[in-house]
Amino acid sequence: IVTRTYTIDPTYPILGSISVNGGATRVKATAVTVTASAINAASIMLSESQVFTNASWQAFASSPLSLPYTLGSATNGSKKIYAKFKTQGGNELGQNGDISAVFALDTVAPVITTFSLFYPETPSGSFDKILAWENLSTETDVSYQVEVYTNSAYTGTALRSGTSTTDQWKVSPVFTDEGTYYWRVRLVDAAGNGSAWVTSGTEKAFTIKLLAQAFQGGTAMTSGRDDQRYFARTIVHY
């Protein structure tokens, strides 16, 4: 008499889903991160083939689970990754290709054609003004990245940086240290590709001068601050 023991698994994976790079609709590299979620799943399979050609199962240790994935082609355009899940007993979800994520691969950086920076407004105190520019490029669906440095080579870490969806950006936090500040702007598309930088150079940099006291007509003028200092960019007559 031969006795065999079988385990019957009546459960199936449910609520399976995936996203790429946090739900991005455009990516700039073939290496992406797939985030998968499911209940009752022990394994997962990912593929760009709806029938999962040459794909293999991976352990699905927890939900959600992030997995690295490399696209099979570096050609720009629409991409689709399929997923299916399996229980310990072998019951599957998504085997028909109904769980997927659609996105586009875009490795082309935006191109600047006509772009000019405006000279910053002269500050009356610490610099908290708006940096502005004009973009006449034909690129669409872009934002702007802005950085401010104390050197015209833009080396080291930016003192201030930020992004804007309009053609201006307010410096924050304010600058309160004297010196000359250089700034630059570039286009960034939805995939994260950045254009070449447009720099202020010396011509459109801004300078903050710290004066202990200013005298006008022989009378000392102060800012009213306890440390008797103020910031100015005006010409002081003695």
Image (cartoon, rainbow, N blue to C red):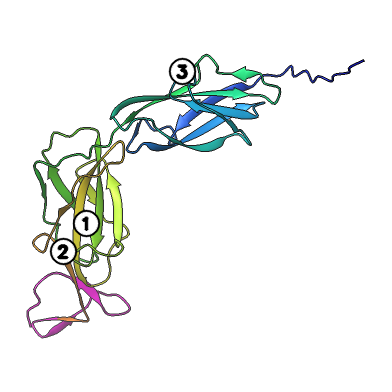
The answer to which quarter of the image holds residue 159 is: bottom left
Side of 218 where 99 appears, left or right = right
Instruction: Look at mark 2 in the image and give the residue it sits on.
Output: 206
Rendered position, 93 above or below 45: above
Q: CB atoms at circles 1 and 2 under 8 Å apart?
A: yes
* Residue 224 covered by magenta stretch: yes
From which residue to which does the magenta span run?
215-238
Side of 16 where 196 appears, left or right = left
* Residue 170 covered by magenta stretch: no
Mark 2, Cα crowd under 10 Å, few <14 / some 14-19 / many 20+, is: many
Q: CA distance from mark 1 to mark 2?
A: 10 Å
The type of residue carrying mark 2 is Phe
The answer to which quarter of the image holds residue 23 is: top left
Q: Secondary structure at mark 2?
A: strand
Q: 210 or 48: which is nearer to us?
A: 48
Q: 69 or 165: which is nearer to us?
A: 69
In the rendered image, residue 49, in percent from the top left (x then y), is placed at 44, 21
Residue at 22% over, 62% down: 154
Mark sitting on residue 56 = none
Instruction: Look at mark 1 in the image and give the residue it sits on.
Output: 129
The type of residue carrying mark 3 is Gln
Instruction: Look at mark 3 in the image and give the residue it sits on.
Output: 50
Residue at 31% over, 33% down: 74
